[in-house]
Image (spheres, grey):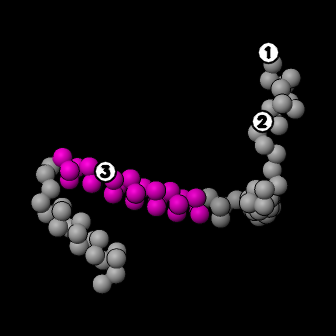
């Protein structure tokens, strides 16, 4: 039996003996987790709907970030602070 299967069995046993308040909390947690999975699906759909040129630019930007080829926020603020003054 895998660790996930053992955990699932443990949770089932706990749920069988849980009170109303605990059950409502578990329900909210599981719904939130499911919603996050749905958000991932939406993000995939949104990516597929983007023009190919934008996908290429965003992929390159992500690659640059992962390689550390970025300008720290503090440097940008320092360089352009005059633009933020009233």
- Residue 10 part of the magenta-drawn span: no
Residue wearing tag 2: 74
In this view, 2 is above or below 76: below
Could you say where residue 53 lies in the image, as x and y percent from the top left? 80, 61
Of callouts 1 and 2, the N-terminal one: 2
**The residue stretch that appears in magenta:** 21-45
- Tell me the quadrant of the picture where the C terminus can be found: top right
Residue wearing tag 3: 28
In this rendering, the label closer to the viewer, 1 or 2: 2
Q: Residue furthest top?
A: 86
Main SS of residues in magenta = helix
Q: Is residue 39 left or right of residue 79?
A: left
* Circle 3 residues within 10 Å: few <14, some 14–19, many ≥20: few
Asked if marks 1 and 3 touch (Cβ < 8 Å), the reply is no
Query: What is the secondary structure assignment of the residue under circle 1?
Result: loop
User: Marks 1/3: CA distance?
Assistant: 45 Å
- Tell me the quadrant of the picture where the N terminus can be found: bottom left
Q: Taking the image as drawn, is residue 51 in sight?
A: no
Could you say where residue 62 lies in the image, as x and y percent from the top left? 74, 59
């Amino acid at each position: 039996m895998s660790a996930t299967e053992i955990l699932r069995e443990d949770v089932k046993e706990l749920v069988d003996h849980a009170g109303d308040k605990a059950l409502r909390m578990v329900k909210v947690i599981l719904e939130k987790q499911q919603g996050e999975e749905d958000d991932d699906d939406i993000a995939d759909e949104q990516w597929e709907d983007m023009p190919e040129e934008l996908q290429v630019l965003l992929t390159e930007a992500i690659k640059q970030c992962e390689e550390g080829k970025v300008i720290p926020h503090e440097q940008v603020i320092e360089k352009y602070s005059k633009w933020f003054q009233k």
